[in-house]
Image (cartoon, grey):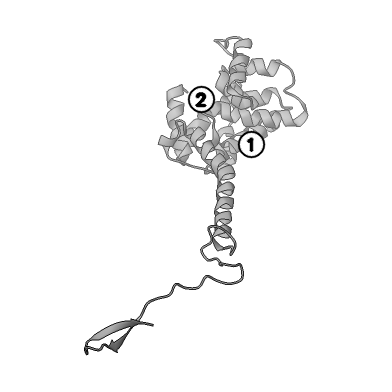
C-alpha cells in the first residue's frame, strides 16, 4: 500500500470508519504475520500474536505518532508481545530486519521501539538502506484474514476517535491539552479554592465581610432620614434624625 493511500485510510479509520480499518488491516497483514512467524514456535502462535497486535493497534489507533505508519504501529504491538515473551528479539538482527526487510524509516523505528524521533533516525542510518527485493513471502493460511480481523475488531472502535482533519499534527495538540489538564487543571482549581477562602475569611484583606476590631462586623453607615417638621414661618422643612 502506498503512503498516500494509507494516510487517507488511516484518517478515516481514526475517525471511526470500520471499512477503512479493514483496508489497513489487509494491507499490513502479510508483513505482520511473516514477522511474527519468524519469532514464534509455530503457525498457531504466530496467528495469536498477529491477532493480538492488530487488536491493540485498533484500540490505540488515535495514538499513532505523527509520521509513523499504521503498519509500523501494528509492528510496535507485535514487537512488544514478542519481546515480552523470552527475549526472542535480542541483538541487532531483528532491528536490521525491521529496516532492511520491511523498509521502516526513522519515525516507524522510533514508534516500534518506543524511543525518540532523533534516535529512530540515527538508528535508520546505521542499519543501512532497505533491501529492494525483501524476503520471500510467507503464504497465508486459508481463513487467516477472517480470524485476524475478528480478533482485531475486539478492540474496535478506537478509544479516542476524532475527525480526519485532526490527524495532521493532532496527536501533538492533544498531548499538549492533556498535559495542561493534568498539570494546569489542579493548579487552577487550587488557586480558585484559595481565592474563595480569602474572600470569605474574616481577617483576610480582601474578604467580602470583615470587622473593624476583630470582634464584630462593621456597623452600617448612618443613613439620613427626614421627618416632617414646622418652621416659624409655617413652611415644612426636613430635620435630621
* Label 1 vs label 2, nearer the camera: 2
Image quadrant assignment for residue 2: top left
**Split into 4 quadrants, where in the image is the C terminus?**
bottom left
Of 83 and 36, which appears nearest the observer? 83
Q: Are there few (<14), some (14-19), or many (20+) residues within 10 Å of tag 1?
A: many
Toward the right, the furthest residue is 86
Of 192 and 32, which appears nearest the observer? 192
Image quadrant assignment for residue 233: bottom left
Per the image, label 2 sits on a secondary structure element best described as: loop
- Residue found at x 56% / y 16%: 103
Residue 133 horizontal/vertical position (percent): 56, 11
Q: Above or below — where is 196 with respect to 41?
A: below
Per the image, label 1 sits on a secondary structure element best described as: helix
Q: Earlier in the sequence, mark 1 or mark 2?
A: 1
Image quadrant assignment for residue 108: top right
Toward the front, the furthest residue is 232
Residue 200 horizontal/vertical position (percent): 56, 63
Q: Which residue is mark 2?
A: 67
Q: Which residue is mark 1?
A: 52
> Is residue 141 visible in this depiction of the protein?
no
Q: Above or below — where is 212 with respect to 164?
A: below
Q: Are there few (<14), some (14-19), or many (20+) residues within 10 Å of tag 2?
A: some
- Residue found at x 58% / y 47%: 187
Residue 53 horizontal/vertical position (percent): 62, 34
The residues tagged by marks 1 and 2 sit, at their Cα atoms, a distance apart of 23 Å
C-beta proximity under 8 Å, tags 1 and 2: no
> Is residue 163 visible in this depiction of the protein?
yes
Amino acid at each position: 500500500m502506498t503512503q498516500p493511500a494509507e494516510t487517507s485510510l488511516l484518517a478515516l479509520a481514526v475517525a471511526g470508519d470500520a471499512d477503512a480499518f479493514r483496508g489497513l488491516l489487509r494491507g499490513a497483514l502479510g508483513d505482520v504475520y511473516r514477522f511474527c512467524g519468524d519469532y514464534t514456535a509455530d503457525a498457531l502462535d504466530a496467528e495469536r500474536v498477529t491477532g493480538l497486535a492488530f487488536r491493540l493497534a485498533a484500540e490505540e489507533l488515535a495514538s499513532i505518532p505523527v509520521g509513523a505508519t499504521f503498519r509500523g504501529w501494528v509492528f510496535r504491538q507485535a514487537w512488544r508481545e514478542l519481546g515480552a515473551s523470552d527475549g526472542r528479539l535480542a541483538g541487532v538482527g531483528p532491528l536490521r530486519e525491521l529496516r532492511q526487510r520491511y523498509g521502516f524509516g526513522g519515525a516507524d523505528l522510533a514508534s516500534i521501539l518506543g524511543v525518540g524521533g532523533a534516535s529512530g533516525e540515527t538508528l535508520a542510518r546505521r542499519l543501512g538502506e532497505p533491501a529492494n527485493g525483501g524476503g520471500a513471502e510467507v503464504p497465508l493460511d486459508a481463513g487467516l484474514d477472517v480470524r485476524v480481523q475478528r480478533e482485531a475488531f475486539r478492540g474496535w472502535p478506537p478509544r479516542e476517535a476524532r475527525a480526519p482533519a485532526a490527524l495532521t499534527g493532532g496527536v501533538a495538540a492533544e498531548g499538549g491539552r492533556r498535559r495542561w489538564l493534568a498539570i494546569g487543571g489542579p493548579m487552577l482549581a487550587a488557586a480558585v479554592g484559595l481565592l474563595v477562602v480569602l474572600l470569605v475569611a474574616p481577617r483576610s484583606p480582601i474578604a467580602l465581610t470583615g470587622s473593624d476590631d476583630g470582634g464584630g462586623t462593621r456597623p452600617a453607615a448612618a443613613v439620613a432620614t427626614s421627618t416632617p417638621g414646622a418652621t416659624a414661618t409655617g413652611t415644612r422643612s426636613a430635620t435630621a434624625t
